[in-house]
Image (cartoon, rainbow, N blue to C red):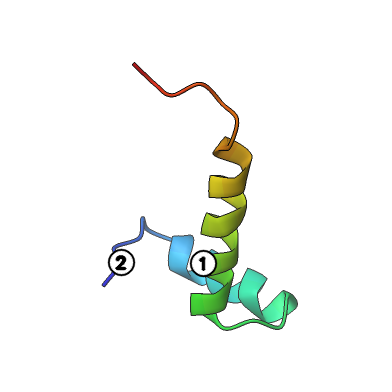
Amino acid sequence: MLRLEDGMRDQLKIIAAQNRRSMNAEINARLAASLEAEKGKAPNA
């Protein structure tokens, strides 16, 4: 289970539909993109 801030679920639902993805697929795609963007950055100390 994932707890989302107010309004975030509705926003994700709309964006997922626009991208022709399920909400699960949209969340996974966004997490993957975020993790990919973190590659190469210096780790936090």
What percent of the width, then of the height, locates residue 8?
46, 60
Quadrant of image for the C terminus: top left
Q: Residue at x 45, y 61 (%)?
A: 7
Quick one: SS at disc 1? helix
The answer to whether marks 1 and 2 mark residues whose Cβ atoms lie closer than 8 Å is yes
Asked whether, in this view, residue 28 is left or right of residue 19, the answer is left
- Image position of 5 (left or right of 17): left
Looking at the rendering, in which quadrant would you find the N terminus? bottom left
Residue 29 screen position, x and y as percent: 59, 65
Which residue appears at 35% of the width and 60% of the height? 4
Q: Which residue position holds label 1?
A: 27
Residue 5 drawn above or below residue 24: above
- Residues under labels 1 and 2: Cα distance? 10 Å
User: How many labels were placed on the picture?
Assistant: 2
User: Can you say whether 28 is above or below 37 in the image?
Assistant: below
Tell me where residue 21 sits by quadrant: bottom right
